[in-house]
Each structure stands twice: as structure tokens, then as C-alpha cells.
Image (cartoon, helix red, strand yellow):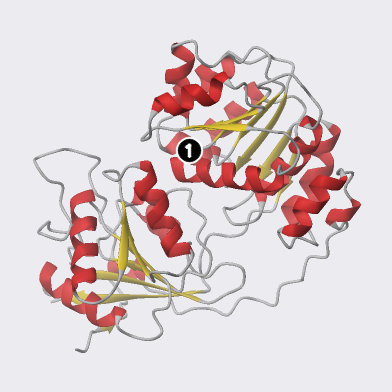
């Protein structure tokens, strides 16, 4: 089956908004969310520009140069780390010194190790627990941080509690009673357990806010202020964000003391990503075209975005039934189901993951060959975030967006 990709110039009277139906699109049951902003189809098109020959960053350190103990160095080497990334190279010395740090960095730059490694080193041998709080915007990102912590802290007698929604609170309460050194969590569940007096922050020495811009986008600012308000003023604060907005600047001013700023953020113009549109008559035609596309050999690792939880699940089920193994990740999945689906996709056991925007936020998924917008995003900023999942680390990437046939 042939599918048509088009390029546009000038203005078109097109309605690229999704129209609902069995496979996603409009919201069900009359529920109301933010109105979708019209995006002209020409905004979904870009002839990829080859990345300019980048000056290869030469780190000033090797991991063995950092003053980490033998066991931590062993754990770092076990993960195959030798030369730090730019954010690791520049941030780790300041974190070791105990300075507050603002890290402007995209997802996928190695920032998790940049804050975990020096904090783990400092916590080794400290009996005051818990003393480190790491806040992330999503369950999946908190889980990834916890997994990294466990790998780096092997053999060091350091423990963590993962405090996120969507899973049994009873287990989390048991973990907290064991007095973990690190608490890693999302704002909502952290605030809930604080209100129940199950988390006490008066002895915390270190605060990490990861992907602060995402947390603000998701409406967590009041929770974050309430959580940080319970922590000692005399602490080290590490603050990571891809952007600095006036709201974020206000947070920086109120939370950090004389911070050092490390900026390794790369452009999000995505000019190096080949972007095109695919015209479809209706929803079922889109499904047919997508199914045909995904049978192509060049669709190696594909992230498909849909608008609704119901539509994403239906589309994933349809692909499975069509002989294209896929997993779905959305808000109706519990935490263990989401983790299992994400692991299958990351480990290349399935090559297609269908996701909603909210469920996919904060995920770092390497080597995505294609991003396909089955449903158009709520706004252009979401589009940029979506397609930024491909073409990372110098690799080429492709983004394709379904639109209505242009008359």
C-alpha cells in the first residue's frame, strides 16, 4: 500500500485536528482538557539539514580522576564508563565541593550520573538517614534514577526508597521505615506521605530537582514549594532543567544559594530531523497506512504518539493483531505494567511503542529511529518535545505526522 507524503508552501485551509474515533483523537465522554491549538501542516515539514561538524568535546577528566572510593570506581567501570559527558565533566567537581548547581541540560546528556555519583560518594559512611531527596516529574524518570542509583551504589550499604504514585503505598511505607539514605520520588506522592507524617525532611542535607521545567508544566509548583519548605535552609541544592523561564528563575532565586550554572543544553530546533506529513482520508485510513509503514525494514525503533489513553491502547492492540508486536504506555497502566512495557521497548524486544504525551514525559529512550504523530499534538511545543526523541547523539532521525488530505 502506498502512502503519500507531502511538502507545503504558503497557506492552506487545512484542519489537522484529530476527529476522534476508535483509535484515538478526540476525548471521550465529554471530558474537557485544554483546547488543541491549530498547527499548520507546513510546521510538520523539514528537510533535514546535516548537523554541522561539531567540535568533539574533550573532557578535562576521566572518571578515575574524580575522588571517588574504590567501590564506587569499580561500579562506574562495571557500567563501561570511562570518559564523562560534558555535563558530568563540568558538574561533578562543583557538586563534590558542595556548591549549589544549576544544570541546563537536555534529557539524555548523562545528568543523572552527574548528580548521583558525587552525592553517593559523600553519603558513603554517613549514618544520618534519610539525607538526600531527589524529585522528578514522572514515575518513569524516578524509576530510572532509582535504577541508576542501585547500580552505582552496589556494595556501599546505601539504600533508597522509590516514592511514586500508581503503586502500592504500603511497600513504600515499609521502605521508608528502613530509613533509606536516598528518597527518590514524584511530587504528588511525596507530598501525600509528608502530610501523613511518614516522610520527615528536617535532617535532609541534599535536594535534587530534576527536569524542573517539566514539573512546572505538569502543575507541580505548589507541591514542590510545600516540600522544599519543609527542608533545612542549610542544604545543597542541584537544579536541572532544559529551559529557564521566569517561573523557573523565581524558583532558582528562592531555592539556591550562589549557584554555579553549567549550560550544556543543545538546540531543540530539530533541524537535523527529517520531518514530513502523511495524508489520510480518515481515522481508519490512518491505521491502514501506519500498519503498512511499520512493516518496512527501516522502521527499526518507532515511538508512535496518540492523544488519548483509550486510543493508544486500541492502536497498540490493532498493531499486535496485525503481526507488529507493540507495547502501549498511558495513564491507565499501573506502574509495573508501564515499567515492563518500557523495558521491552528499550531492550528491543518490541520495536514499536504507542504512547500518550503525559506517559512518555521524561523518558530517556535511546536509538529511536522514527517518531510518528498518529494524532497531532496539543501545541507546537509538544511537537518539538515529541520529535526530539529521535535523532539524538548525532544519529539521524525521522518524524512523520498524519494530517487530513489537503483539498
Q: Quadrant of the N terminus?
A: bottom left
Q: Does 80 sit above or below residue 201?
A: below
Q: Position of residue 254 (x, y in %)?
A: 63, 21
Residue plotted at (42% across, 75% down): 46
Is residue 61 rendered to the left or right of residue 123? right
- Give the total of numbered labels: 1
Q: Residue tagged by mark 1?
A: 137
Residue 82 quadrant: bottom right
Q: Quadrant of the C terminus?
A: bottom left
Residue plotted at (73% across, 45% down): 262
Residue toward you, 247 or 355: 355
Residue 372 quadrant: bottom left
Residue toward you, 13 or 66: 66
From this viewpoint, which residue is outermost toward the bottom? 2
Is residue 264 rendered to the left or right of residue 25? right
Q: Position of residue 313 (x, y in %)?
A: 22, 56
Q: Residues within 10 Å of mark 1 (few under 14, many from 20)?
A: many
Residue toward you, 274 or 190: 190
Q: Position of residue 136 (x, y in %)?
A: 52, 37
Amino acid at each position: 500500500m502506498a502512502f503519500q507524503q507531502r511538502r507545503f508552501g504558503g497557506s492552506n485551509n487545512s484542519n489537522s485536528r484529530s476527529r476522534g474515533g476508535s483509535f484515538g483523537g478526540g476525548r471521550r465522554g465529554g471530558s474537557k482538557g485544554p483546547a488543541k491549538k491549530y498547527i499548520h501542516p507546513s510546521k510538520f515539514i523539514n528537510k533535514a539539514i546535516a548537523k554541522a561538524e561539531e567540535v568533539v568535546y574533550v573532557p578535562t577528566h576521566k572518571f578515575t580522576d574524580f575522588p571517588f572510593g574504590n567501590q564506587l570506581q569499580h561500579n562506574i567501570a562495571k557500567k563501561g564508563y570511562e570518559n564523562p559527558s560534558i555535563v558530568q565533566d563540568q558538574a561533578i567537581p562543583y557538586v563534590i565541593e558542595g556548591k549549589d548547581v544549576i544544570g541546563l541540560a537536555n534529557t539524555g546528556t548523562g545528568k543523572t550520573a552527574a548528580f548521583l555519583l558525587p552525592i553517593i560518594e559523600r553519603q558513603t559512611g554517613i549514618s544520618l538517614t534519610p539525607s538526600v531527596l531527589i524529585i522528578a516529574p514522572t514515575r518513569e524518570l524516578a524509576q530510572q534514577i532509582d535504577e541508576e542509583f542501585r547500580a552505582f551504589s552496589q556494595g556501599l550499604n546505601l539504600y533508597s526508597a522509590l516514592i511514586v504514585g500508581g503503586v502500592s503505598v504500603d511497600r513504600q511505607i515499609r521502605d521508608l521505615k528502613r530509613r533509606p539514605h536516598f528518597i527518590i520520588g514524584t511530587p504528588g506522592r511525596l507530598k501525600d506521605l509528608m502530610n501523613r507524617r511518614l516522610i520527615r525532611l528536617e535532617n535532609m542535607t541534599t535536594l535534587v530537582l530534576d527536569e524542573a521545567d517539566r514539573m512546572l508544566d505538569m502543575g507541580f509548583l505548589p507541591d514542590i514549594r510545600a516540600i522544599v519548605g519543609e527542608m533545612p535552609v542549610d542544604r545543597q541544592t542541584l537544579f536541572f532543567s532544559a529551559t529557564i523561564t521566569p517561573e523557573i528563575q523565581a524558583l532558582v532565586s528562592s531555592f539556591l544559594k550562589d549557584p554555579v550554572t553549567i549550560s550544556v543544553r543543545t538546540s531543540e530546533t530539530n533541524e537535523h530531523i527529517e520531518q514530513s506529513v502523511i495524508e489520510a482520508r480518515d481515522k481508519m485510513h490512518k491505521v491502514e497506512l501506519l500498519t503498512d509503514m511499520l512493516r518496512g525494514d527501516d522502521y527499526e525503533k518507532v515511538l508512535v504518539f496518540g492523544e488519548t489513553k483509550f486510543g493508544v491502547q486500541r492502536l497498540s492492540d490493532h498493531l499486535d493483531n496485525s503481526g507488529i508486536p507493540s507495547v502501549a504506555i498511558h495513564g491507565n497502566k499501573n506502574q509495573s505494567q508501564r515499567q515492563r512495557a518500557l523495558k521491552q521497548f528499550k531492550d528491543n524486544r518490541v520495536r514499536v511503542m504507542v504512547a500518550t504525551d503525559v506517559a512518555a514525559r521524561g523518558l530517556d529512550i535511546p536509538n529511536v529511529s522514527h517518531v510518528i504523530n498518529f494524532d497531532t499534538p496539543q501545541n507546537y511545543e509538544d511537537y518539538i518535545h515529541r520529535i526530539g526523541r529521535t535523532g539524538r547523539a548525532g544519529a539521524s532521525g525521522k518524524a512523520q505526522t498524519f494530517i487530513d488530505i489537503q483539498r
